[in-house]
Amino acid sequence: MIQFCLSMIVSSTLRSNPMFLDMYNYVHIDEKWFFLTETSERYYFLPEEEEEEEEANPYRSCQSKNFITKIMFMAAVARPRYDEDGIELFSGKIGIFPFVFQGPAKRNSKNRVAGTLETKPILSVTKDVTRSCLIEKVLPAIRSKWLLAHANAPIFIQQDNVRPHLSVNDLEFNEAAKQDGFDIRLCFQPPNSPNMNVLDLGFFRAIQSLQYQRAPLTIDELIEAVEKSFDEMEVHRLNHVFLTLQSCMVEVMKDKGGNNYKIPHMNKEKLE
């Protein structure tokens, strides 16, 4: 892990005043389950509100707390870019993509008849499913949102080491990644290093807290809630998580490559 952290430092500064690379050409991807609801929620009512009001306290039910509807999403983010005056040029938010498919309803219900197409979650995300998401969704999103002035430099998609993720030599992905003049490559973060990904460091939690505020009742509403929460997340918070990532790399090097440290607290507003 030390080698990985050292690779993120400008080599000419190693012996004097070490400085991290700007990391502008790295796209962090990761997957997370988002649930339709928490196992328990707390609602606050105004004195004039009634507890029975459906809009204030939406009723929901499931077989048990172990069977709460959930969807896995893949998120892709990069470090935001600003001009010399601090004006945002690129939000860094590539996109968040649900693993779902359209399938016919098997039975009649009060909401739809049998055979009606409905959104269903993909519960087993395999390498083929991941490859399809990267090629059909992540790559086009990068091409459409990336600053053209920086499109000629290599862009690295950093992923963790879970089995469904692709090898850096995946032929189908590498062929698709070279289209339209882009040079997009896959890379891995060190194994057993959750703090080396900005999504795990806090961005996912921030999205989830916004998503729960919307109280979705269906799969389609859950997808809409997660996507809106992703879009509404403040850009400066994403930049803050990249600063946290760099501070974690410092701690890893102090710990000689270990994970026995607490995530540092910094006054990030002054470090931007």
Image (tube, rainbow, N blue to C red):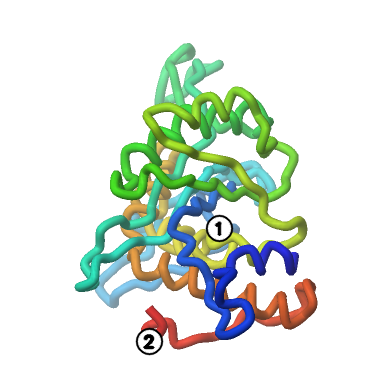
Q: Is residue 71 above or below residue 122?
A: below
Q: CA distance from mark 2 to mark 1?
A: 36 Å
Instruction: Bin the neighbour count of mark 2 within 10 Å (Cα to Cα): few under 14, some 14-19, many 20 and up.
Output: few
Q: Is residue 98 above or below residue 109?
A: below
What residue sits right under mark 1 in the picture? 38
Label 1 SS = loop
Counting from the top left corner in percent of width and height, residue 247 is at 58, 78
In this orientation, does residue 49 appear?
yes
Place residue 211 in its image quadrant.
bottom left
Is the C terminus in the top left, top right, bottom left or bottom right quadrant? bottom left
Residue depicted at x 36% and y 37%: 143
Residue depicted at x 38% and y 55%: 92
Q: Is residue 166 left or right of residue 216?
A: right
Label 2 SS = helix
Instruction: Bin the neighbour count of mark 1 within 10 Å (Cα to Cα): few under 14, some 14-19, many 20 and up.
Output: few
Q: Amino acid at mark 2?
A: Lys
Residue depicted at x 60% and y 46%: 68
Counting from the top left corner in percent of width and height, residue 192 is at 76, 60
Place residue 81 in its image quadrant.
bottom left
Q: Amino acid at mark 1?
A: Glu
Of the residues tagged 2 and 1, which is closer to the observer?
2
Counting from the top left corner in percent of width and height, residue 22 is at 46, 66
Residue 270 - label = 2
Counting from the top left corner in percent of width and height, residue 2 is at 74, 69
In this orientation, does residue 32 appear?
no
Q: Is residue 125 above or below residue 205?
A: above
Sooner in the amino-acid sequence: mark 2 or mark 1? 1
